[in-house]
Amino acid sequence: MKKYGCIGKKLGHSFSKDIHAKLADYKYELIELNEEEIDSFFKQKDFAAINVTIPYKQTVIPYLDSISEITNRIGAVNTIVNKDGKLLGYNTDYYGMKALIEKTGIDFQNKKILILGTGGTSKTAQIVAQDLGANQILTVSRRESLEFITYDQAKKNHSDANIIINTTPSGMFPDCESKPIDISYFSQLEGVIDAIYNPLCSNLILDAKEKGLKAEGGLYMLVMQAVVAVEKFLDTKIQKEIVDQVFTSVLSAKQNIVLTGMPGSGKSTIGKLLKIPNFTFVDTDEEIEKQCGCSIKELIQTKGEQYFRDLESNVIKEISAKNCQIISTGGGAILRKENVKNLKKNGKIFYINANLSRLCATEDRPLSDTKEKLAKLYDARIEIYNSTADVIVPDMKTPQEEAEFILAKRMECL
């Protein structure tokens, strides 16, 4: 039986298996290998074709019988085909990176580029930037050398950079909070590309989008490099329509649906009506109550609203790092920017815009247990709900109608 798969050191975060399942009819395995296992793996040659990821894109080259021209320019391999016992090396990351940049609409012609990181993907980004006509390309490393500049040097001496490409693992799951650089130092920045695809939007990308820059995470790159890899694996050609369908399918299968809105607007009811295969419904208020062992009303009464908000932020941070979820948030979740940012890393925010007349004050919500408190909260929060939403769900006759609206709009947003 022919064997296909991906080798790397840690592959728990990988989407590759899901993508290949949509592109081709073969079994694709994720094969975690340590450094000591590489030699034996390649001597056995017990595979038809494989992808290669961190940290082995350069390690594997001595085992290959030949490499493509682009691979030779880059000096890194991510695709290997076993053809009658001869191992042929390719770099399909090149095509993935180029396709991602073109999709994002960033013009590299005569621009100054900063590439963060020095590994295999960094070398790919350098060659792509050259081929797209960049005027100056600088590689940024934690250590200064003749080849690289440091992050401090980048901020101090190259604040006029036009484009930043991140190829480091900074911000990748499970370390979703980190980011490789603060883009506020760069006054002439036009676009940001991040090779990270898990989370779907890293902090770096969210920062760029907040500034109105062209910015995109690495999922499209991952899909496009997989497309070219499959073409190499099977000696075939995949049509663009299929590629677009696969990308949309992968994104929709991973991207969370986040519901925001006033207490009593029906977020939980609507969320449970959103029947999506392999998705899990999560209510952040219920998760908080599980953790504290009491109702939210009791929690606020005994420890105060600040304690509750801190716990809410921790719960949101933990939940939003995962994919394939329908997340119903508490009414005040959007009051903290950190919550909104975390929710948008893997999700789109749908604001349930229920009219005030539809909302009811209830005793179990201490911050809105009277009509007066409810109206005051509504006036204070309405602008924040609108400004933080990716989609505003209009007030409809039934929760079912609102759920159907969300499902339709969700596909439009992909």
Image (tube, rainbow, N blue to C red):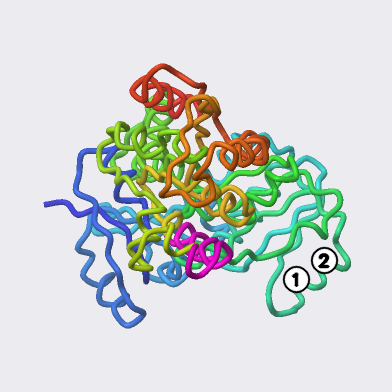
Q: Amino acid at mark 2?
A: Lys
Q: Quadrant of the rendered structure where residue 53 is?
A: bottom left
State the separation of the CA atoms marked 2 and 1: 6 Å
Q: Which residue is mark 2?
A: 155
Residue furthest to the top in view is 397
Q: Residue at x 57, y 34 (%)?
A: 390
Residue furthest to the left in view is 1
Percent position of residue 86, x then y: 29, 58
Whether residue 275 sits left or right of residue 372 in the image: it is left
Percent position of residue 267, x then y: 41, 37
**Mark 2 touching mark 1, by CB under 8 A?**
yes
- Do we see residue 192 in this rendering? yes
Which of the pair 29/76 is nearer the observer?
A: 29
Write the start and end of the magenta stretch as one range. 301-318
Q: Which residue is mark 1?
A: 151
Q: Is residue 317 magenta?
A: yes
Q: Amino acid at mark 1?
A: Tyr
Q: Is residue 310 above or below residue 262?
A: below
Say the numbered circle drawn on residue 80. Answer: none
